[in-house]
Amino acid sequence: MYNTAILFAVSFVSSVTTFYVNEHLKHGPVRSSAMLSLAVGLFFYFFPHLMNSFLVKNIPIVFIGGSFIGMVSSRVLSNYLLIGTAGLIFCLIYINTSRFFNGYGGAVGTASAIALLAVLSLPVVTKRHRLTNGMMLLRKTLFGSPRR
Amino acid sequence: MNRHKTIRTIFIFFLLIIQVVFISEILKENTHSLGIVATMIILSILLLITHLRGEIHHKDHAYEHVLVALWIPAGAFVTFYLNHFLKLGPVLSAAITGSAASFIPNLRKQSHYLQQLPAAIYCGAFIGMSSAGVAPNFLFITTASLFTAILLIISKNLFAGVGGKLGTLAFAGVAITSFLYFLISSYV
């Protein structure tokens, strides 16, 4: 339970931090994701006994997965809370990911994409970067516009 | 024009299938947990809504240049080498490759071509993250890189700016290659 909570926190922080470095510090998506993941990876490479083996193994993977969400363009999503939410959904998928795909390169990226696309469907961010009523849009998508 | 539209539709449908298969495998292994089953079904519905609304794609279809996609194998080989031969692990290997690639545009800031290379190399790095059980040799990495390169070429304006797109393309390339290897080993 304690370990899982840490992974959720890491995922949230990773996605939000990467987005900040990407969009506000203007380092671009690749450098933001790779450099932050490099810092975390190096930390656990040199200090493998600082935490229990579960966290040492999983924190770098969850961090890089969360950072893929932070690579999102601000034209697509610019709300920090929603980006963090996508990070949490990613962690939920990661924890339950099928053993069938163990060792498949890109599986973490696929989980990130699923989390981000799921978030994009709910409270939709308009082109003016404002939150609109997600439930109204969801109803409109499912049942169409109301008749006049 | 129609050919572009067909390619676009097939690609979007293909990626949706990949994502649905990914979720359904989670469902299959967690049928005992009602919470996970409900969560995955909700996720699938939300995913479908985003795909149906289609606002994540550019209206015009465009193709990535082959010379950009050719850098995918480079990223994959370097990461695979760091991961399996220097034993740095998948995350550190991909992060080193991606970090190095992100500085390539600094070599000549006016070059539009160099600006596109980090994404292609980072996409390749995800292929190199595969474990030895899935990707046993450089031939597998080359084949997976080839499939991923094709997907990158046709998806230039699709899922643009969506985080996880490069990972999904890499996953699709690795999954296709694994399936191909499975077919070959079954019939040869």
Image: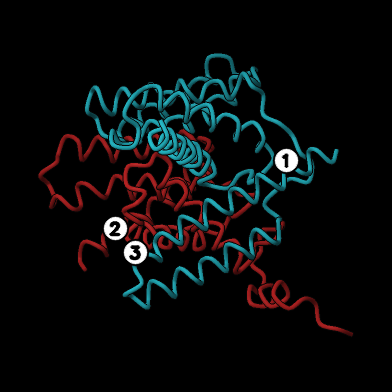
Label 2: element kind: helix
Kindly indicate whether the residues beneath marks 3 and 2 are on one polypeptide chain. Answer: no
Q: Residue B179, how many percent across, how many down? A: 45, 40
Kindly indicate whether the residues beneath marks 2 and 1 are on one polypeptide chain. Answer: no
Q: Distance between the residues labelled 2 and 1?
A: 39 Å
Indicate the quadrant where residue A40 lies.
Answer: top left
Q: Which residue lies furthest to the bottom in this view?
A: A148
In this view, A36 is above or below B13: above
Label number found at residue A7: 2
Kindly indicate whether the residues beneath marks 3 and 1 are on one polypeptide chain. Answer: yes
Q: Disc 3 residue type?
A: Glu
Q: Could you tell me which chain the residue with mark 2 belongs to?
A: A
In this view, A30 is above or below B76: below
User: Which residue is tagged 3?
Assistant: B29
Q: How crowded is mark 1: few (under 14 residues within 10 Å), some or many (20 or more)?
A: some
Q: Could you tell me which chain the residue with mark 3 belongs to?
A: B
As drawn, the chain in cyan is: B
Q: Could you tell me which chain the residue with mark 1 belongs to?
A: B
Q: Which quarter of the image is occupied by the N terminus of chain A?
A: bottom left
Q: Disc 1 residue type?
A: Ile
Q: Residue A60, how many percent across, how many down? A: 29, 45
Q: Residue furthest right?
A: A148
Rendered colour, chain A: red
Indicate the quadrant where residue A125 lies.
Answer: bottom right
Q: Is residue A25 visible?
A: no
Q: Which residue is drawn at 52% across and 21% down?
A: B71
Q: Disc 2 residue type?
A: Leu
